[in-house]
Amino acid sequence: MLFFMLFLVGLAVACSDNELHARDGHPHTRVHEKREYPQFPLTPPYRPLVWGDFNVIHTTDTHGWLLGHQKSTWPEPNYSGDLGDFASFVTHMKQIAIEKDVDLLLVDSGDLHDGTGLSDGYPAGGVDAHESNKFLERLPYDLMAIGNHELYVYADTYDMYTNFVPNLHGRYLSSNANITIFNSDGEAVSVPVGSE
């Protein structure tokens, strides 16, 4: 124990120059600046958006990418929007649909996590997607379906069942995916994760 304490003191003294040194010997100072998204011209639409009587915006396999992709090579700049950009886009599109008196459904077909540290067990030891789903449930989804990544770990599925699905008020579909829970009598029963 004494050796371990001396090691920690020595480590603290060695790092007292306020620089972190990577294995390559390159000094990394502790400067935390706001990171900007790549600023590249986006390809403009080549024709006007044609609205029908029934329109759908569909997302799938987002896998916790709340911050979007931030790469400068083509075609990535076209996909560099974050969740806030997407929320703004959907809000504007829903408003346009109201003005045009047409239907616009926002639909997701699952796999909300297993992709980034923002959705995978954050905070450490936490349940996958518990925190990141709080952002997603604020979006005006008309319909969501369960994905296979929501089923891999019982704790994740149970968290979806108890904390996420109820906020969608019957708009979360999972007709072929059940979870085993205990009923009020303490008996194990199999129930659909979402609505059938």
Image (tube, grey):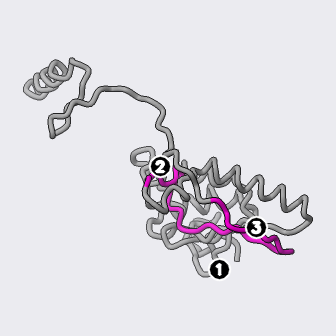
Q: Which residue is mark 2?
A: 118
Mark yes or no: residue 129 visible. Answer: no
Residue nearest the viewer, comparing 132 with 54? 54
Span highlighted in magenta in the image? 44-72
- Is 139 on the left or on the right of 189, as rendered? right
The amino acid at mark 2 is Leu
Tell me what residue is drawn at x 63 percent, y 75 percent: 174
Q: Position of residue 94 (x, y in %)?
A: 80, 58
Q: Give me the disc on residue 56.
A: none
- Is 89 on the left or on the right of 177, as rendered? right
Q: Earlier in the sequence, mark 2 or mark 1?
A: 2
Q: Quadrant of the N terminus?
A: top left
Spatial CA span between label 2 and label 1: 28 Å
Spatial CA span between label 3 and label 1: 34 Å
Please say if the residues under marks 3 and 1 sit with CB atoms less than 8 Å apart.
Answer: no
Residue nearest the viewer, comparing 99 with 66? 99
Q: Which residue is farthest left? A: 3
Please say if the residues under marks 2 and 1 sit with CB atoms less than 8 Å apart.
Answer: no
Mark 3 or 2: the one toward you: 3
Label 3 CA crowd tier, 10 Å (few <14, some 14–19, many 20+): few
Q: Is-magenta flag for residue 59?
A: yes
Q: Give me the disc on residue 49.
A: 3
Q: Which residue is mark 1?
A: 175
- Is 154 on the left or on the right of 167, as rendered? left
Tell me what residue is drawn at x 47 percent, y 65 percent: 154
| Secondary structure under the numbered disc 3 in the rendered image | loop
